[in-house]
């Protein structure tokens, strides 16, 4: 035993207690003795007791009354009657009502009493272990969530996210969220706001990558009439609208580096000026920021001010990509299927086995957003009753055999790995990206090498940007952004 059981013996006859002391002096149990029910209750208030053994007939408080009180206050304590008083009907009634666990006659047989006590201690340990197990399961169920706010997923990575949001939300501290595109950074920001003391106030979200740089300052701080061409009236910015609430700045590293210095001063002082105004305004805002790239890389690349990052990065939350979230992709897919069945008035029953295999097998470079769009497209285009692997491959504009090679007519080869959703061809896709040796230069600039690799991937995929991005292990939006800088932009 890890811990000796504690036994309490209650009897108003001193010679009975003395006899019990002699019998138990070499036992492995810790034994306590009381001469009345009142004394026994005082001991129970001060010391955890596993077994109570009580005489039946005692003055002031009977054994029946004592054990009834013990059953009410300490239900996991085993209760035994040790008495020469024989009223079988009362004793059986007490047993049936759960007030006592067993009965031993006086005078007792030492070996039989010890055997009864051993059995009682074993029973109490089983009861205690079950209670501990129930408590552990209850705590696990409280902490382990399959859903949280608008998030869906029970993976270990998401449990860390849920826990971080719950802890960070009540605070006033700024939060910096990092995660790939489509992982749910705005969902996390909204969850923090909803669990905060500011939930009754405004939640304002700005995507720094979607707003032209020359308009960004006005979007944040607002402007007055005539501040610039097109400013025909006064306009409040996000800073004013979010007063008392939360301001979420998504893709912060895409904000103009000069504007970041004004943002830093605003965060530090809580004051700002509208564009074209000299009037200082003060607001109370909680800041949540996010980026889909490594913040330190952005700092090193001069895309993000180090002082701004350190000022905002009080609480850091990292959202795991979908490929690292165990079976969450399948759970999400089923949820999206139910949702789009209803919104599109369809009656698709379920996902086929090869569709489920594709979902768990594919790397989902666009994460949850890509999976959601894929299921939505498949629901619209499928004739049912099942969403098949081919339906999903069509929605991804890919060949099913590229994602699940074993689905090819010739049997294919090894299945693609989750982090490499498309099987690599034997030919090196970057072979044509090697810089040609010229008379004046042997090495091309890095951006030219990158451009040649992208062009080769696009040609290999017949111009399909999504497939090319998957082969190159980047997001489609990254390819579109890089293609915009080419002199001859291929059609999307």
Image (cartoon, grey):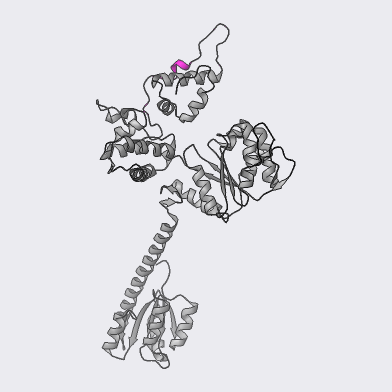
* Res. 167 in view: yes
Give the camera-side residue of 10 and 394: 394
Highlighted magenta segment, given as a residue range = 420-444
Position of residue 239 in the picture relative to residue 409 (left or right): right
Give the camera-side residue of 58 and 284: 284
Using the rendered view, name the quadrant where residue 297 is placed: top right
Using the rendered view, name the quadrant where residue 321 is placed: top left
Q: In the image, what residue occupies the spot 41% across and 63% down? A: 135
Is the residue 169 above or below the residue 32 in the image?
Answer: above
Give the camera-side residue of 378 and 4: 378
Question: Is residue 261 on the magenta stretch?
Answer: no
Q: Residue furthest top?
A: 439
Question: Is residue 431 on the magenta stretch?
Answer: yes
Give the camera-side residue of 455 and 224: 224
Is the residue 14 above or below the residue 482 in the image?
Answer: below
Position of residue 314 in the picture relative to residue 105 (left or right): right
Residue 453 drawn at (x, y percent): 47, 20
């Amino acid at each position: 035993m890890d811990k000796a059981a504690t036994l309490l013996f209650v009897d108003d006859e001193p010679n009975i207690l003395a006899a019990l002391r002699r019998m138990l002096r070499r036992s492995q149990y810790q034994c306590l003795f009381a001469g009345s029910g009142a004394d026994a209750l005082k001991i129970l208030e001060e010391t955890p007791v596993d077994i109570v053994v009580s005489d039946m007939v005692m003055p002031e408080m009977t054994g029946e009354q004592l054990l009834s009180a013990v059953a009410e206050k300490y239900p996991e304590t085993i209760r035994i009657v040790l008495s020469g008083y024989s009223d079988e009907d009362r004793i059986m009634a007490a047993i049936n009502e759960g007030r006592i666990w067993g009965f031993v006659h006086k005078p007792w047989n030492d070996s039989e009493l010890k055997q009864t006590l051993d059995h009682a201690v074993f029973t109490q340990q089983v009861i205690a272990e079950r209670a501990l197990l129930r408590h552990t399961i209850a705590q696990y169920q409280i902490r382990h969530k399959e859903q949280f706010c608008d998030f869906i997923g029970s993976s270990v990575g998401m449990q860390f996210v849920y826990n971080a949001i719950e802890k960070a939300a009540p605070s006033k501290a700024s939060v910096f969220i990092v995660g790939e595109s489509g992982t749910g950074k705005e969902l996390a920001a909204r969850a923090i706001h909803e669990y905060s003391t500011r939930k009754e106030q405004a939640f304002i979200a700005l995507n720094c990558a979607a707003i032209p740089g020359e308009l960004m300052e006005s979007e944040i701080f607002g402007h007055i009439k005539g501040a610039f061409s097109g400013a025909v009236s006064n306009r409040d910015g996000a800073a004013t609208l979010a007063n008392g609430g939360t301001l979420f700045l998504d893709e912060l590293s895409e904000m103009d580096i000069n504007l970041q210095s004004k943002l830093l001063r605003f965060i530090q002082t809580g004051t700002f000026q509208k564009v074209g105004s000299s009037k200082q305004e003060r607001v109370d805002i909680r800041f949540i920021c996010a980026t889909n790239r490594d913040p330190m890389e952005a700092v090193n690349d001069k895309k993000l001010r180090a002082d701004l990052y350190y000022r905002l990065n009080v609480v850091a939350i990292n959202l795991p990509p979908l490929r690292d979230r165990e079976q969450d992709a399948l759970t999400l897919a089923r949820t999206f299927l139910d949702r789009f069945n209803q919104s599109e008035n369809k009656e698709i029953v379920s996902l086929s086995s090869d569709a489920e295999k594709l979902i768990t097998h594919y790397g989902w470079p666009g994460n949850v957003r890509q999976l959601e769009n894929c299921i939505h497209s498949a629901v619209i285009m499928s004739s049912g009753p099942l969403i098949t692997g081919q339906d999903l491959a069509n929605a991804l504009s890919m060949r099913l055999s590229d994602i699940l090679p074993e689905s090819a007519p010739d049997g294919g080869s090894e299945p693609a790995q989750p982090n490499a959703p498309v099987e690599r061809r034997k030919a090196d896709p970057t072979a044509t990206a090697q810089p040609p040796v010229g008379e004046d230069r042997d090495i091309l600039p890095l951006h030219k090498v990158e451009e040649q690799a992208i062009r080769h991937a696009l040609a290999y995929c017949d111009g399909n940007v999504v497939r090319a991005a998957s082969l190159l292990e980047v997001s489609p939006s990254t390819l579109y952004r890089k293609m915009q800088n080419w002199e001859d932009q291929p059609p999307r």
